[in-house]
Image (spheres, rainbow, N blue to C red):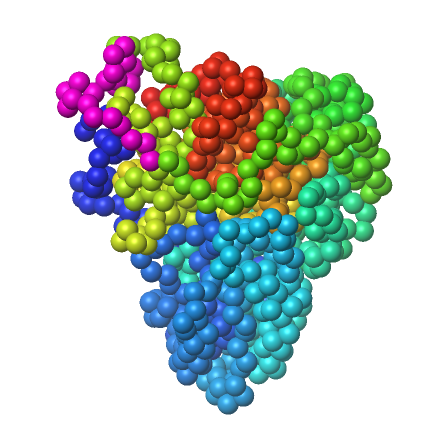
Amino acid sequence: MKRWARALYQPNLPLKREGRVTASKEHIALSEKAAAEGMVLLKNERNTLPLQRGKRVALFGKGTFDYVKGGGGSGDVGCPYIRNLYEGLKKLGNTEVFEPLADYYRDYVSDAYKGKKAAPGLIPEAEVPSDLLAAAAAYTDTAVYTISRFSAEGWDRSEVVCKKEANPWEDEVSMPELAAGIYPKGDFYLTDREEETLDLLRKRFSSVIVVINAGGMMDLRFVKGESVDAALLAWQGGMEGGLAAAELLTGLGNPSGRLPDTFAGELGDYPSTGNFHESFDYVEYTEDIYVGYRYFETIAGAAEKVVYPFGWGLSYTTFSEKVSELDAEGEEVRAAVQVTNTGRRSGKEAVLLYFSAPQGKLGKPKRELLTYAKTRDLMPGETQTLILTAPRSRMASFDDTGLIKKSAFVLEEGEYRFFLGGDVRSALPLEKTLLLKEAVVCEACESLLPPTSLHKRLRSDGSFEELPTGEPLDLNECIFEKLAPDQAEGIMPEAKGRERHKLFEPYMDGKFSFTEVAEGRKSLEDFLASLDDDELIHLCGGQPNTGVANTCGFLNMPEYDLPSFMTADGPAGVRIVEETGITTTAWPCGTLLAASFDQELVCEVGRAGGEELLENNLYIWLAPGMNIHRNPMCGRNFEYYSEDPVVTGLTAAAFVRGVQENGVSACPKHFAANNKETNRKHSDSRVSERALREIYLKGFRMMIEDAKPHVIMTAYNAINGQRASESHDLLTKLLRNEWGYQGIVCSDWWNRAEHYKEILAGNDIKMATGFPERVKKAMELGALNRGDLLACAGRILEFALAMP
């Protein structure tokens, strides 16, 4: 095929000779495999699970049929079908289901959604009829209760609605208000009806099994208590999540997932809850680096609030681990661990290596994750040696006040201890330690994005450090009047036209085809020099949809043989609008993938997603989402990976590597500190440089250095008074100069940043559309020049050269 043929021509050609890979049997099977590997067995008293073959079960809860495959917004995707738990069990055929009860819940769910365009999971729980309850109890001693939850882009898991900005989508249902009507206490907690149902089941059944179909953290005290005998956290498992859960419940698979988050009992137990909705305009990250288990395992009195700790996960078999080697004296920490299946079933085991740094002058969390690895499926008695490695600098702390060396990553003097196991609490100490007799400066950096309005931050002893404040920056500073929201929201790019031209002489005098650059006959510098300012500005904005795309694209200069490289939303799948007739594979949510703790599996998912992208003539997959789970209320947590930056970085790197093996591009998002959806286009994340570096940027850096994505998407929010897409500190000084990033940067769609300021910062492409007239006006006023345009355009054209 001709260079860029998939970007230039329609219709889509199958990627492989055997036929289309999009939503193929192989990809759907991989989705189901991934779903099973990330599900977490929370509890299994008296070996209630797995269910014996032929076991009679009664399926309770509207969640049996009201299955949530994933969250909403860009985290949604159209797929050929969705299989719920009932359908999964029926497909396997190894249990007997009490059908009258199933009929009742099926009809209830169908009636609740009839005539409505509603999101799954957002209907109230059904009341259990007493006659059906009695009949079910006569049929079996085992009840399986499915509880489902849904959240989405654009709103948080609370009743709070921000109406500060005019909404151009006036006919939209207010999701926070809808959810509040169903979950009066908030969907973090069980509703009264759900609690009543559990009480009824406990009284009538000797075995009560709960399946939790949710994308994020919940109050699981009801699982820990006596009401429940076994519980499977099935997350949101994609299109085959019901089948995956059924296989685990019936023993055709063995759970091997672990929690990538800490599950506490009360929403208020998380230190970030108190000020999450303090203001629509900002969030103060006063918990600093003490996010998730770093808080619960460090701060006095917090540990007792934990229901299930980070890393928790049970199996139907048992494992032993023996460390045969640990070396931390050089630039790399290396551990060799022999993992043996000591039980009676085959299974996989994820092994996590933690470290504990000396408190020193800076103060540290009690334990931190260093790295992890997962075995293959081990037969009983089988042993596998895992090699766990991590750069020693991963244990360094960022000194933002100059107690040791200002703006530097340092390893303080003292003893560094290591722990191996599963969850953060039960991991056992290793004999060998690392003793540093003096502090080591791992990397000297520059002070970037310093806070001016963060008043205090938490210390490791539970006290707060008062911070100096200064004059706050103006988010909306602009050399001319800002666009009104209705002039920026939902605006599509102008369709580029061409004058009449001869068929075989398409290029203007003094111009030449970009194909000549791709073939090495002309230089990129000469091509850039031949473009006028209008053409350079054109490159810096999003381009109209072509083919099956619905999220716009890049470049689009057909007069120079430069096609439109189209984007597709993600990460739940390659999202293509249903009106095209094309459906794609719906993958498990991001949190489930992280819970697998299996980098090879995540890479496989990324590779398959990249194949579907390319086969449909799309080039940039707007995935993965990799913001930190700072608080359970963030409505988009399902799309992201973890409260831990190492899990986030390693999972995202594996995903990006897989996608880009196809020659196309992943687009990790949202860079950075995007941890709240309410008023997301104006909210200022006020965070210390240390927390920014150690928690919110660390995963991005790990992913960039490992996987080298071609594109990164900036966040809507501001960071310490600077909109992310307008921040020269973030995009040029840190991302490019300090980290060495070589790709391009695009904005999130329809943000409230100013286009000329984005160009100056190093945000190369404004999506979904640029505003050429405003960029030209800024040039006339002397705010930017041709050199600024050339810098962005050059990187964009380098991207084109990297595409197949």
Percent of width and height locating residue 413:
76, 23
| Quarter of the image where the N terminus is located | top left
* Residue 356 screen position, x and y as percent: 71, 35
For the residue pair 340 and 216, the one nearer the viewer reads as 216
Tell me the quarter of the picture where residue 509 sits: top left
Q: Which residues are magenta?
A: 495-518
Write the residue at 58% across / 69% down.
Answer: 182
Above or below residue 472? Residue 513 is above
Residue 764 placement, left or right of 423? left
Is 500 a magenta residue?
yes
Quarter of the figure that contains the C terminus: top left
Say which of 375 and 140 sits in front: 140
Q: Position of residue 635 (x, y in %)?
A: 57, 52
Q: Looking at the picture, how far across and down is residue 113, in whole percent?
A: 44, 71
Nearest to the observer: residue 70 or residue 298: 70
- The residue sitting at 40% across, 25% down in the picture is 539
> Can I make out residue 604 in this image?
no
Q: Residue at x 72, y 48 (%)?
A: 279
Task: Give the left or right position of residue 623, taking residue 270 as reference.
Answer: left
The residue that appears at 70% across and 59% down in the rendered structure is: 265
Chief SS of the magenta region: loop
Is residue 27 covered in magenta? no
